[in-house]
Image (cartoon, rainbow, N blue to C red):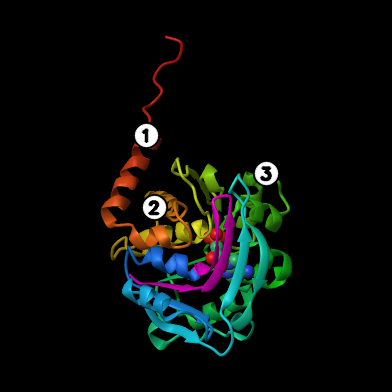
Amino acid sequence: MSLLVVGSIALDSLETPFGKKEDVLGGSATYFSTTASFFGPVQLVAVIGEDFPESHLQFLRGRGIDLEGLTREAGRTFRWKGKYGWELNEAQTLDTQLNVFESFSPNLPAAYRETPYVFLGNIHPELQSRVLDQVKSPKLVAADTMNFWIQGSRPALLKTLQRVNLLFINDAEARQLSGEHNVVKAARAILAMGPSRVVIKRGEHGALLFDQDHIFACPAFPLSEVFDPTGAGDTFAGGFMGTLASSGASGKVDQQLLRKAMVMGSVMASFTVEKFSLERLREVQRPEIHARFAEFKKLTHFDDLGPLGG
Ligand code: AMP
C-alpha cells in the first residue's frame, strides 16, 4: 500500500567531530522517502527553491519516489545548519532558514488524497494540519516534530496532535512537549494529547514504543563507526512506516507488526548514521538490510529464566 509523506527538503550544512559539509542533501521528507522507497510506493509533498540541484531530483526519481506533489518555487531552498558534539546524540541548531517554506501551502494531487498511510514529517504544524484537511479517511497518520516547533508553534502543534495516531519524537523533545522529565511519564502525557501511540527515540540508546497497554523497547544497533546522526529520526520513521505500509492487504496494525516496524526503523537508522547526509542510504542494498535485521534478532534474543536459586 502506498505511503504519503509531507516534510522538508533541505540543503544542510553539517559539522560533526569527524568533518564538515556545506549544502548537502537533507530534510525530513528526503530521509523518510528515500528509506520508505525500499519497502513500497511513496508519494512526496514538499517544496524546493530555484537553487535545488537537478542531480538530487534525479536521485529521488531514481528511487521510484512519486514527485507529483513536489513544487519548485521562486526563492531559495530551506536550509538548516547543525552541529554535533562528541556524544553525537543531539544536534545543536546553528541556523534555520525557512526560505520557500515561509509561503508554502501543500496542495495534494488528486491521486494522493486516498493514500492509506500518512507521515507528517518535521515542518510547521499548521502545514501538517493542512495536509490532513486534504486526505480522505487514512488508515494511519503518523507525525514527527522538533524543539523548533514545540517552542515556537505550540498551540498549532497541539491541534495537529489531536488528529495524529502515532507520534515520533526524541526524548529531549518529549520532555519539552510534556513538561515531564521521566520518559514514561512524558509518554503518558503525550498519549493524553491525542496520539494513541508514541515512539520516543533515544539516539544510541534505542527507541521505546508506548500505547495505553504496552511498552516495547528496541536498542540501537551497536556500531563501531557513527559519523553523522542527521536524519536518523526520519530514517527510523521511514523504515517503521514502510514496514507497516508493506505489511499486506489485511494491513492489521497489531503489536507484532509494530515491533517489527520498530526494529526495521532501527535497522535503517543504523545505516544512515554511518556516513554523511544520505551517502550510506544511497548505496545500501536489500541483502544488507536483511542481514542487519537478522543481527538485531540475535542481539536481543534470550531464553526464559527457569527456576531461581536451584
Ligand atoms: P533528524 O532525523 O531529526 O536528524 O532530521 C534532520 C533533518 O531535519 C535535517 O536534514 C534538516 O534539514 C531537517 N530540519 C531541521 N530543522 C528543521 C525544521 N525546523 N523544519 C523542518 N525540517 C528541519
Q: Position of residue 283 (x, y in %)?
A: 34, 60
Q: Does the numbered disc 3 mark a residue whose Cβ is under 8 Å from ligand 1?
A: no
Residue pictured at 52% horizontal, 83% vertical? 51
Q: Nearer the N terminus, badge 1 or badge 3? A: 3
Residue pictured at 43% horizontal, 76% vertical? 44
Amino acid, disc 3: Asn
**Res. 167 visible in picture:** no
Amino acid, disc 2: Met
Residue 17 belongs to the span the image colors magenta = yes
User: Callout 1: helix, strand or loop?
Assistant: loop
Q: Are the two marked residues, 3 and 2, in contact with CB atoms closer than 8 angstroms?
A: no
Q: On the rendered image, what quadrant is the C terminus found in?
A: top left
How many C-alpha atoms fall within 10 Å of the one at disc 2: few (<14), some, or many (≥20)? many
User: Callout 2: helix, strand or loop?
Assistant: helix
State the extent of the magenta-drawn residues as a range: 1-28
Q: Nearer the N terminus, badge 1 or badge 2? A: 2
Image quadrant in which you'd find residue 308: top left
Q: Main secondary structure of the magenta part?
A: strand
Q: Is residue 34 above or below residue 216?
A: below
Quickly name the residue at label 2. 264
Residue 143 belongs to the span the image colors magenta = no
**Res. 60 visible in picture:** yes
> Who is closer to the viewer here, 201 or 85?
85
Q: On the rendered image, what quadrant is the N terminus found in?
A: bottom left
> Who is closer to the viewer here, 66 or 20?
20
Amino acid, disc 1: His
Quickly name the residue at label 3. 182
Quickly name the residue at label 1. 301
